[in-house]
Image (cartoon, grey):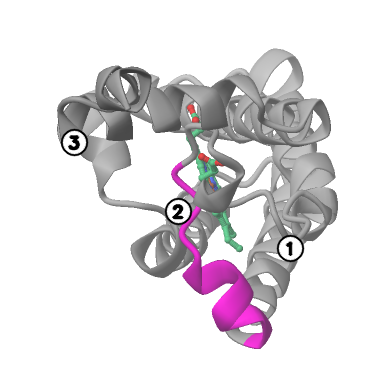
């Protein structure tokens, strides 16, 4: 009687302990999966920014920056739809910005992923063509394809937590 009284005195503390236990007990495969996809997305974000920076500079370094960055975006995009196995959402107990809607509206999510793949393949072609106006247009189209998915399937908390 006394012991059970001690076990859970304040509901809020009990909830907090429960969440800690959940995090500690998270499946290591989910931890690896989520961390790895976040790393790869960061690579893609960095690569897209690098191309944008070249466009802003005016004198574009195609060989050292644009071609390799476009390749990174294309390579990553090709596999993007494999990074979201069921169970790797917030229910895993691991910090992720992936929204449950990914698995609820999976056809729509996959459609957006495939559209991004098409834009990434075009971006790669344009980078190889070294044509400035085409690059400008395709960087914009790529950015829209990334954003279309983020608007529906990435938590808005990402922008809050990352200040952008
Ligand atoms: C089909 C959907 C989809 C597409 C397309 C997509 N993303 Fe994302 N992106 C996500 C989701 C979902 C997350 C959250 C992942 C997580 O937190 O587990 C994310 C996270 C990110 C992050 C944050 C990674 C971190 O945690 O630091 C960046 C940066 C990013 N994406 C960039 C891009 C760029 C650049 C493109 C296009 C070239 C792109 N994404 C295309 C769904 C998408």
Q: Residue 12's spot in the image, x, y percent?
A: 17, 32
Q: Marks 3 and 2: CB-CB under 8 Å?
A: no
- Mark linked to residue 11: 3
Q: Residue 100's spot in the image, x, y percent?
A: 50, 65
Which numbered disc, 1 or 3, marks the residue that appears first in the sequence? 3
Q: Residue 83's spot in the image, x, y percent?
A: 76, 49
Residue lying at 75% horizontally and 30% vertically, measured from the top left: 67
- The image shows residue 48, relative to residue 107, as above or below, that is above
Ligand 1 lies under 8 Å from the Cβ of mark 3: no
Bounds of the magenta segment: 97-107
Q: In the rendered image, which quarter contains the N terminus?
A: top left
Q: Marks 1 and 3: CB-CB under 8 Å?
A: no
Residue lying at the far top of the rendered structure = 64
Q: Secondary structure at mark 2?
A: helix
- Check disc 2 and report the residue beneath it: 143
For marks 2 and 1, give the CA distance: 12 Å
Q: Is residue 14 left or right of residue 126?
A: left
For marks 3 and 2, give the CA distance: 45 Å
Q: Nearer the viewer, residue 77 or 124?
A: 77
In which quarter of the view is residue 37 placed?
top right
Residue lying at 60% horizontally and 31% vertically, measured from the top left: 38
Based on the picture, tell me whether residue 103 belongs to the magenta stretch: yes
Q: Residue 114's spot in the image, x, y percent?
A: 72, 72
- The image shows residue 104, relative to residue 61, as above or below, that is below
Residue lying at 76% horizontally and 32% vertically, measured from the top left: 27
For marks 1 and 3, give the CA distance: 47 Å
Q: Nearer the viewer, residue 84 or 122?
A: 84
Which numbered disc, 2 or 1, marks the residue that appears first in the sequence? 1
Residue lying at 84% horizontally and 42% vertically, measured from the top left: 75
- Check disc 1 and report the residue beneath it: 117
């Amino acid at each position: 009687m006394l012991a059970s009284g001690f076990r859970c005195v304040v509901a809020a503390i009990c909830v907090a302990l429960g969440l800690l236990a959940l995090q500690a007990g998270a499946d290591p495969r989910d931890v690896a999966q989520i961390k790895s996809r976040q790393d790869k997305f960061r690579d893609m974000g960095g690569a897209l920014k690098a191309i944008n920076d070249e466009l802003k500079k005016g004198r574009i370094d195609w060989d050292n920056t644009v071609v390799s960055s476009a390749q990174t975006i294309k390579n990553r995009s090709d596999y993007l739809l494999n990074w979201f196995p069921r169970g790797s959402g917030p229910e895993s107990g691991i910090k992720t910005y992936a929204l449950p809607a990914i698995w609820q509206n999976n056809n729509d999510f996959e459609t957006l992923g495939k559209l991004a793949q098409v834009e990434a393949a075009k971006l790669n072609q344009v980078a190889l063509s070294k044509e400035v106006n085409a690059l400008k247009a395709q960087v914009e189209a790529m950015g829209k394809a990334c954003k279309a998915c983020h608007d529906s399937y990435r938590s808005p908390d990402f922008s809050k937590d990352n200040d952008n």
